[in-house]
Image (spheres, rainbow, N blue to C red):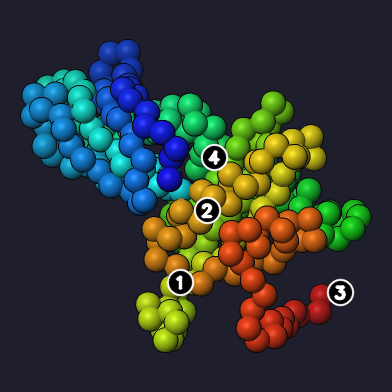
């Protein structure tokens, strides 16, 4: 949940000449979970666009527990479009995240940095240098999955590239008494640039992921913790599994 209300955040997208146009203004208020309220007039934002804006706010605000209130905007008879509305909402939410110091959702352009941070994590877990050759396959999967259902990567920008990142995935398992819907989450890829550590970045990434997992309906979330990260995860309520966790791996030469 955001700690304070943020008023009058404007999202504007326009191009020179013809092109998608979008202009909206929103307030963001603390709330236990995401909600959208339309208080803009029909003249400012027609109902069809306001409804679409609500859907886009839900998507762009992954990991933010807050109420988005559409309070105004401008509509152009020729250039206004759903694409323009989407880009305007995206601009507004990016301003919100920057204002509050919140992680943002990764975009395809972040893939090289996500690969770099993955290498940082694997090197730490291995206790030394790791083999190469996996990077291109990892990048290809990220490029395919970013922006798709059941997958999210949150990142924090640093002075030199990404400061930290974490990934969440959703899988459909079999229902059980403790998980009637069978929806499971996995938290992985948590890494912080060594130059950016001890600044609370990892905690903010995990906070965003936990909000996202709850919104996705996950009743169980699994992760593999490093020694350094175990305390952080325990502070969010993670505990050892009640039964032994075993893994089988194919042996490769």
Q: Earlier in the sequence, mark 4 or mark 3?
A: 4
Q: Earlier in the sequence, mark 1 or mark 2?
A: 2
Q: Which residue is mark 1?
A: 219
Residue at 75% in and 79% down: 249
Q: Which residue is mark 3?
A: 253
> How far, Cα to Cα, is label 2 from label 3?
35 Å
Q: How many marks?
A: 4
Task: Tell which tag, 4 or 3, sits nearer the viewer.
Answer: 4
Image-quadrant location for residue 53: top left
Image-quadrant location for residue 89: top left
Answer left or right for 197 relative to 170: right
Answer left or right for 12 relative to 44: right
Q: Which residue is mark 4?
A: 103
Q: Earlier in the sequence, mark 3 or mark 1?
A: 1
Residue 166 shows which numbered tag? Answer: none
Q: Residues within 10 Å of mark 1 (few under 14, many from 20)?
A: some
């Amino acid at each position: 949940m955001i700690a304070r209300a943020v008023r009058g955040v404007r999202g504007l997208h326009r191009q020179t000449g013809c092109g998608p146009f979008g202009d909206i203004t929103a307030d963001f208020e603390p709330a236990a979970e995401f909600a959208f309220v339309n208080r803009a007039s029909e003249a400012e934002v027609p109902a069809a666009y306001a409804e679409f804006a609500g859907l886009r706010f839900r998507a762009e605000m992954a990991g933010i527990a807050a109420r988005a209130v559409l309070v105004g905007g401008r509509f152009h008879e020729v250039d206004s479009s759903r694409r323009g509305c989407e880009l305007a909402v995206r601009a507004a939410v990016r301003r919100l995240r920057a204002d509050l110091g919140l992680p943002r959702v990764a975009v395809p352009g972040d893939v090289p940095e996500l690969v770099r941070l993955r290498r940082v994590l694997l090197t730490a877990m291995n206790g030394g240098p790791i083999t190469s050759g996996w990077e291109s396959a990892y990048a290809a999967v990220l490029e395919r999955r970013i922006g798709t259902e059941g997958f999210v990567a949150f990142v924090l920008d640093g002075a030199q590239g990404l400061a930290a990142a974490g990934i969440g995935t959703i899988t459909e398992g079999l229902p059980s008494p403790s998980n009637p819907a069978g929806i499971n989450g996995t938290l992985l890829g948590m890494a912080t640039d060594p130059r950016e550590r001890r600044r609370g970045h990892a905690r903010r990434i995990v906070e965003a992921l936990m909000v996202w997992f709850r919104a996705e309906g996950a009743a169980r979330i699994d992760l593999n913790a490093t020694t350094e990260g175990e305390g952080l995860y325990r502070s969010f309520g993670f505990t050892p599994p009640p039964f032994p966790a075993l893994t089988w791996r194919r042996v490769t030469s």
